[in-house]
Image (cartoon, rainbow, N blue to C red):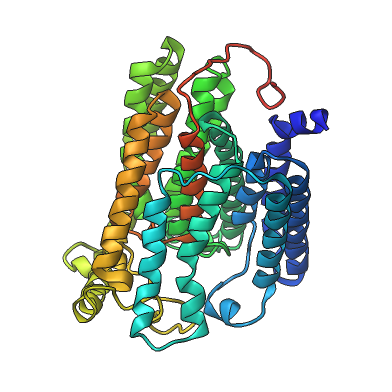
């Protein structure tokens, strides 16, 4: 049993789990059952690990892979209304957690973030005092209590610290990286390749290379998840400073974000990369400073040598022009006005999740593409207070536990909060679960840092 737990604590295990997750996502259409089979298999594996081991951090790589393994196009409200595959998934999770709790009986501690998650959970339910009842509204409104339950469970049962979750984030980031490279390649090959390369690239950037919906989220959402996970890649650079080949992952990550055509992603990553560069200058080795500076300079060379590249990127960024600011922002001003109107009608507790469904698509709730406006619309002033309490708790925890690795995580996290001004973040299921895993680990951090100077291949380093 000790050997098995050592394997689960190593690097091969999360690597294999991530490879399986990336492969499972690629099975769609007539092969959708294979995708679902992978998901059920991963859940059974998680249940077994939960039943055998007291430390639940061993199942986090599985759950991270599961978040990005679902590939159901147009996933929406009908999957909540019907007794769908998603309920089977939820049932398996509950069984595994119940077995673990009964067997190990951990000591209970509320943690730093409990109040914030509790207030958010309550704020989701309050609109039901006056909004017409529906099973769909109830199911979505209970998600807040799901967040609280996940936080309390892992807060009291997971013993992994910041370094471990950053390692898990690194391997999880490879899942999205592989998915985007695969999707871009598939989309590129499906285009009319007889057209000029500029036309092909422009079309690809504007359509996310025809993979705008990855099954677990649209491309803009995926870039937000990726932004948080890429902290794991930067962690690996600092943890293994002599492993120069690890730089290939952030380089590829920057490329796939540019190719995504996500303008919010472009802005956020420009800011994040600048902050990471300052961190390298301040805390990195001479070799790391040289590599980071060389990459930054080399990235500018194509822009200078071929002026059509920056012109093409600017054309995609301005999206037809900036004279019509609403159109330039992909109709966000209209969404913000709609959100504000709902807030004016229900100022204290908001209009709830299903008050206004997505225009032209009754299978989707309306997302207001801003954490601030989305909070005002669905939960009003109560929601703003709840989100404020959670964020203050998160910031206080980051400051209290700050070290180099938590600093890396903080840069990625703060970048996603900035992105949340343009796209909703705090109220997204996958994003919130990622932050729960991150902050649970940070709460357990003791500030001790160990730098690995060995030249051993880090995937097998123990």
Extreme residue toward the left, this view: 323
Residue sitting at x 38%, y 80%: 128
Q: Left or right? Give the position of 49 relative to 285.
A: right
| Residue 329 position by quadrant | bottom left
Q: Inspect this view and state whether residue 4 appears.
A: yes
Residue sitting at x 53%, y 15%: 451
| Residue 7 position by quadrant | top right
The number of discs equals 0
Q: Of residues 375 and 125, which is closer to you in this image? A: 125
Residue 241: percent from the left, percent from the top?
52, 17
Residue 425: percent from the left, percent from the top?
39, 56
Q: Is residue 226 above or below residue 357?
A: above
Q: In this view, does 462 lie above or below 348?
A: above
Quarter of the image with the N terminus is top right
Q: In this view, does 267 lie above or below 142?
A: above
Q: Of residues 201 and 329, which is closer to you in this image? A: 329
Extreme residue toward the bottom, this view: 132
Q: Is residue 17 above or below residue 164?
A: below
Q: Inspect this view and state whether residue 312 appears.
A: no
Q: Of residues 24 and 204, which is closer to you in this image? A: 24
Residue 74: percent from the left, percent from the top?
55, 73
Residue 252: percent from the left, percent from the top?
52, 38
Quarter of the image with the C terminus is top right
Q: Left or right? Give the position of 282 relative to 88.
A: left
Q: Left or right? Give the position of 14 relative to 420.
A: right
Residue sitting at x 40%, y 73%: 125
Residue sitting at x 39%, y 32%: 299
């Amino acid at each position: 049993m000790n050997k098995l737990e050592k394997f689960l604590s190593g690097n091969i295990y999360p690597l294999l789990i991530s490879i399986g997750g990336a492969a499972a996502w690629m099975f769609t259409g007539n092969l959708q059952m294979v995708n679902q089979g992978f998901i059920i298999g991963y859940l059974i594996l998680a249940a077994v690990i939960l039943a055998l081991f007291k430390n639940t951090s061993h199942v986090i790589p599985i759950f991270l892979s599961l978040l990005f393994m679902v590939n159901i196009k147009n996933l929406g409200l009908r999957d909540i209304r019907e007794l769908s595959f998603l309920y089977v998934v939820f049932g398996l999770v509950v069984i595994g957690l119940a077995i673990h709790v009964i067997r190990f009986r951990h000591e209970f501690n509320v943690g730093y973030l409990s109040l914030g998650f509790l207030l958010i959970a309550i704020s989701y339910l309050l609109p039901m005092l006056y909004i017409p009842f529906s099973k769909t509204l109830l199911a979505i409104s209970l998600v807040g209590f799901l967040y609280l339950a996940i936080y309390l469970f892992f807060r009291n049962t997971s013993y992994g610290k910041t370094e471990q979750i950053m390692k898990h984030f690194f391997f999880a980031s490879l899942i999205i990286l592989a998915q985007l490279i695969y999707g871009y390649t598939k989309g590129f090959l499906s285009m009319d390749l007889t057209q000029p390369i500029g036309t092909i690239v422009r079309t690809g950037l504007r359509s996310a290379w025809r993979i705008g919906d990855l099954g677990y989220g649209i491309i803009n959402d995926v870039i937000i998840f990726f932004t948080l996970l890429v902290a794991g890649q930067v962690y690996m650079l600092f943890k293994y400073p002599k492993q120069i080949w690890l730089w290939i992952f952030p380089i590829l990550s920057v490329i796939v974000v540019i190719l995504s055509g996500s303008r919010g992603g472009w802005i956020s990553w420009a800011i994040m990369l600048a902050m990471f560069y300052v961190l390298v200058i301040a805390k990195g080795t001479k070799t790391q400073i040289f590599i980071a500076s060389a990459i930054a300079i080399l990235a500018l060379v194509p822009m200078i040598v071929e002026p059509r590249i920056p012109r093409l990127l600017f054309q995609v960024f301005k999206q037809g022009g900036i004279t019509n600011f609403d159109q330039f922002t992909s109709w966000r001003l209209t969404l913000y006005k709609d959100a504000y109107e709902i807030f004016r009608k229900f100022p204290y507790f908001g209009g709830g999740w299903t008050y206004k469904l997505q225009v032209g698509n009754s299978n989707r709730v309306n997302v207001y593409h801003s954490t601030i406006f989305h909070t005002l619309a669905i939960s009003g002033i109560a929601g703003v207070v709840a989100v404020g309490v959670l964020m203050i708790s998160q910031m206080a925890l980051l400051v209290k536990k700050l070290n180099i690795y938590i600093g890396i995580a903080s840069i990625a996290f703060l970048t996603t909060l900035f992105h949340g001004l343009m796209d909703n973040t705090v109220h997204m299921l996958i994003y919130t679960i990622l932050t729960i895993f991150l902050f649970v680990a940070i709460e357990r951090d003791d500030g001790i840092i160990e730098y690995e100077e060995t030249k051993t291949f880090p995937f097998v380093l123990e």
